[in-house]
Image (tube, grey):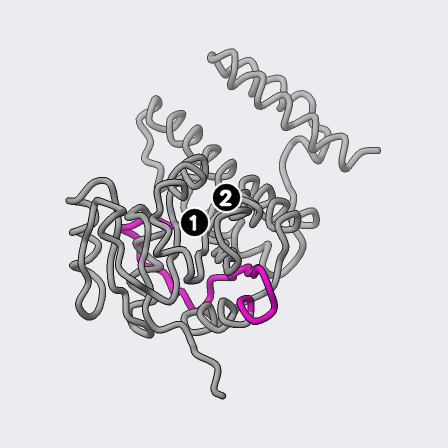
Amino acid sequence: MERKRINDVIIIGSGNVAHHLAIALSHVVNIKQIYSPNKQHAESLANLVEGECTPIDNVDLLQDADAYIISIKDDAIASFMRTVPQRNRNAIWLHTSGSIGRDVFNGFNSRNGVFYPLQTFSKAVALNMKEVPFFIEGSNPETEELIMELAGYISDNVHHADSELRGKLHIAAVFACNFANHMYTLAYDLLKENGLPFSVLAPLINETARKITTTTPDKAQTGPAIRGDKGIMEKHISMIHDPFKKELYEMISMDIFKRYNN
């Protein structure tokens, strides 16, 4: 008997991740519905997917599907699942979180898993989903095989990862993306205060990103902290007026110094 593939999918959520997943998946499966408590948000995303897709803002209106993908805030997943009608729970249920374990489905159903794309998503920024790494976990081998197959429709970079490993991946991603982007924000503020455009840093940022694709980050590190240039660091600290930013500069510089000057 031929194994059934996932054909009909319902997306729970309308944020950044849901936006990109719904559009990408709509080219290879049937996205039947987009659910969001904000009907307007659901409508906006439903209008972007291929085929017929119904926006809904009431879980009682969920139709039957082969799989439901929950792509909402991490701390809302468990509470949302308690509202799902029993009639919809026989299908495969997935969430897209890196930090929430598969055990969030305990007592919910027997066919579930995780569909975690390791990428930063913004609705207004297009990206190549084929290059996005997906980390997959399923409640049993058959379910995991179906989830892996679904991810493989839209990505060439699909891996198995249990909940503990995904959590560590997510921490690494926070350092590499979220924290790095916050540093860009601080740099943006400093330049703006002094009448300079952020674009002057673009060549530096681009070269930094390019360089770590050809060598390891520790070998790419430069700057006054790795050189132990205390005079420059103290001068920088004296020029920073915000106490928290001053402490942050000093703390990160010390961490870099200790790593390379043991």
Residue plotted at (37% across, 44% down): 72
Relative horizontal placement of residue 122, taking residue 259 as reference (left or right):
left
Where is residue 240? Give x, y as percent.
50, 16
Where is residue 105? Give x, y as percent.
51, 48
Amino acid type assigned to the residue bearing label 1 in the image: Thr
Residue plotted at (40% across, 65% down): 129
Amino acid type assigned to the residue bearing label 2 in the image: Cys
The residue at which mark 2 appears reads as: 177
Instruction: Residue at the far bottom: name it.
Output: 1
* Mark 1 crowd level (few <14, some 14–19, many ≥20, 10 Å Cα): some
Q: Which residues are magenta?
A: 121-144
Assign a secondary structure to mark 2.
Answer: helix
For residue 168, above or below residue 4: above
Q: Is residue 134 magenta?
A: yes
The residue at which mark 1 appears reads as: 120
Cβ atoms at labels 2 and 1 below 8 Å apart:
yes
For residue 36, above or below residue 239: below
Relative horizontal placement of residue 209, taking residue 29 as reference (left or right):
right
Which label is found at residue 62?
A: none
Where is residue 186? Give x, y as percent.
44, 28
